Image (cartoon, rainbow, N blue to C red):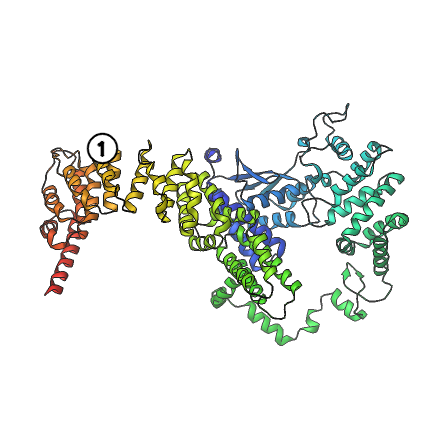
Amino acid sequence: MPEEKQEKLPLDAKLLSDAVIELNISRRSVGLYPPEHPIVRISIGRAFEHLQKLFEIRAEITLGIAKDALIVDEYTLDRRNPVFREFAQTLHTKGIAAVTFSLGLGQRDLTKLHELISAQDTPIGKELVELADKEISRIRLSSIDYGNFCFVEGTQRSGTACGDVWEDYVYGLLEGKLGEGNGLQDILSIPPETVAEMVNSALPDEAGHESYDRVITAYIKRKSESKISREAFNKFFSFIDRLKPEIKRQFLSRAGSRLTEDIGDVETIINGMTPEGFEKIAELLTENSSIIPTTLKNLIDKLSSIKKGKLGHFDFFYNDTAVLHDIELGEEVIKLFGEDHFHSFVGKEYQRELERMLEVKPEDNTKFIRFRKECEEEALDKEALEIMLELLHEDYLKPEDYLILITKLSEFMNIFTETGRFEEILDTYNTLITHALSGRFKNEASSIVDYFFHSEEFIAKLVEAFRLWGRKDRDGAIRLARALRRTIITPLFDLLAEEKDASMRKFLLSVLEAIGSDVIPAAVKRLNDSRWFVVRNMICLIRDCNGKQELEKIRKFLKHENSNISMEALRTLLHFKTLDALPQLRARLQSDVQDVRTGAIRLAGIYRVKEAVPYLMTYLEKRDLFGTEAYYKTDIVRALGEIGDVRAVETLEKICHARALFYKGDLEGLKVEIFRSLENYPLESVRKLIEYGIGSRNDEIHALSEKLLMSLHTGEQRGK
């Protein structure tokens, strides 16, 4: 079947990378903006388009999740890519082992997926998979298999059945015997009642505080999250409620101080609870008030009075219940908000105006296209950045205000790095450098420059961004690399040495070359690399960065066994016009090795070495009755054309009048190359060739000759 063949086709790496990047961008957008926001629609649309391109190759694409890495088929996507890592970690923390996208999915499916994995209060693991199965049709999630938990060798409780994974997990957690596996990040996937039952039976009477702390940490102090999630909070107290009285008191006693550290998060979570949910929490804590910290006790007392509505004001409506705030609303107003009374406060004239607006055809809205572009994520981010940079110059700023602004700027820089926004990063860097040199907050600006922009973490992300986005914004990448030269040179060299793609190596070389002479010491250090292409690239860099002082180190490569390296060394000598450059070139022009001779011929043309003309003429004048040498003589004709020496014209005329018994096509190609090269000769010296070309039946030769003839006549008119 065609579909079976399609499944075996390899995915295009570039398409796949772009699709994952757009998926992560759209995930962020869904987490930040409401569903109908233009930014969400645009980012979801882009992700959808990239997936459609992948579906042209394969009807189903599965991304495997290995903690902070993405796996497709048997290949792991680049672990150094921060976007890939972030997307993988997001799915992993939700207990997802794989996500499969199928042909026919819609944009709504993508939006719903992102809503599920971005929300803090959604279930994780199997429960999330079941929820996704109900709400999404063409995206399939697979939960993490807890059979893959990693325990320290030799510490599993004897007698435990192999299939009783959860029991092993809880036992390992209490005893601190979990290895560096999924460990503390996956307890939320186990039903709270199951954890409570196992803790009641497995926790020894003499258990130390560490056992309690490990369980508490697994629920409410997870490393992957900056604050307590609503789901973790609810499951933790559901677990607490099912414990034996003495164990319950111990857990509450140890957890109280932890919760007090994040009292703001706790208040937010409790505020959003239903009255029934709050009542259970309050009752549990009140029963054990003697061991609860005062701060937490006061919070419960405060919220209890609010939930019971002691002051008779209203904040918002939870179903049919009014919640306390500082504005008193009458019953009529409450009724107004509780029912649909649109017509009671919207006049007929205004209704007609709304109807006219809704009747406007899409084609009439073309004048609003500019505003749609201005609402895109990139435009909004750039506008926000410009506002913050302007605020940094304001005289009324206090030191603490300045610190808040530059901290926010550093967060923006991480986003811009992931998406290749090099110009914005450079603008921010230059602004802060200016402040560090002359400004009211020199110390603050210097600190952010040193500890952020020159940090290993930021530079590593930036170098990876150069690899992903650099060729799309070459100028921006080069300008930013120049600005950060002090810390970015070595990481760029490391990336260059490991890069397999020739076009990417060329781009990285152009960035390093643009940095200038500062790269020369690093290039010299790498001349001893065992890889020939690394050595050749280092010689190129030294030459292009005007490293004339390093010529002695380069001369030793003239006799290197690899012709690519030796030819690059010779090119460097020709570039700097050293005294030994011409003898070295002549020796190679007379070599018996075809590749060496061809390389020397090309260098003679590139550097327009007139001394090489006699040697080139010797090869060009070699008799070739059968036309077998025509293909090899093309490089010679090009080199002579670059030099433009009139001594070659007579030989070129003979070739144009020559005939071949065989390989006539190669000879005809050589003639075309001759006419392509004539523009560098004095036009008067090639008049006969131009006249020959005018009468040629070869269309290209005829067109080139007409152009040359016109230039010749123009020159004659100017001379009169």
Residue situated in front as seen by the camera: 62 or 447: 447
Depth check: give the residue in front, 326 or 275: 326
Identify the residue under disc 1. 591
Q: Amino acid at mark 1?
A: Ser
Residue 33 shows in the view: no
Query: Picture quarter containing residue 711?
Result: bottom left
Residue 435 rendering spot, x and y as whole percentages: 55, 63
Position of 613 with respect to 578 (left or right) is left
Q: Position of residue 273 (x, y in %)?
A: 78, 53
Question: Is residue 654 shown to the viewer in this render?
Answer: yes
Q: Is label 1 in a helix, a strand or a loop?
A: loop
Is 89 on the left-hand or right-hand side of 465? right
How many residues crowd mark 1 within 10 Å: few (<14), some (14–19), many (20+)?
some
Write the residue at 20% across / 34% down. Answer: 590
Q: Residue furthest top?
A: 159
Q: Position of residue 599 (x, y in %)?
A: 26, 38
Q: Residue at x 49, y 55 (%)?
A: 422
The one nearer the camera, 317 or 26, is 26
Q: Nearer the viewer, residue 90 or 212?
A: 212
- Say above or below: 396 vs 489: below
In the image, taking residue 240 as reference, residue 645 lies left or right, namely: left
Q: Position of residue 235 (x, y in %)?
A: 77, 44
Q: Does 47 sit left or right of 215 as displayed?
A: left
In which image quadrant can residue 185 be found?
top right
* Quadrant in the picture for the C terminus: bottom left
Q: How many marks?
A: 1
Q: Residue at x 13, y 35 (%)?
A: 622
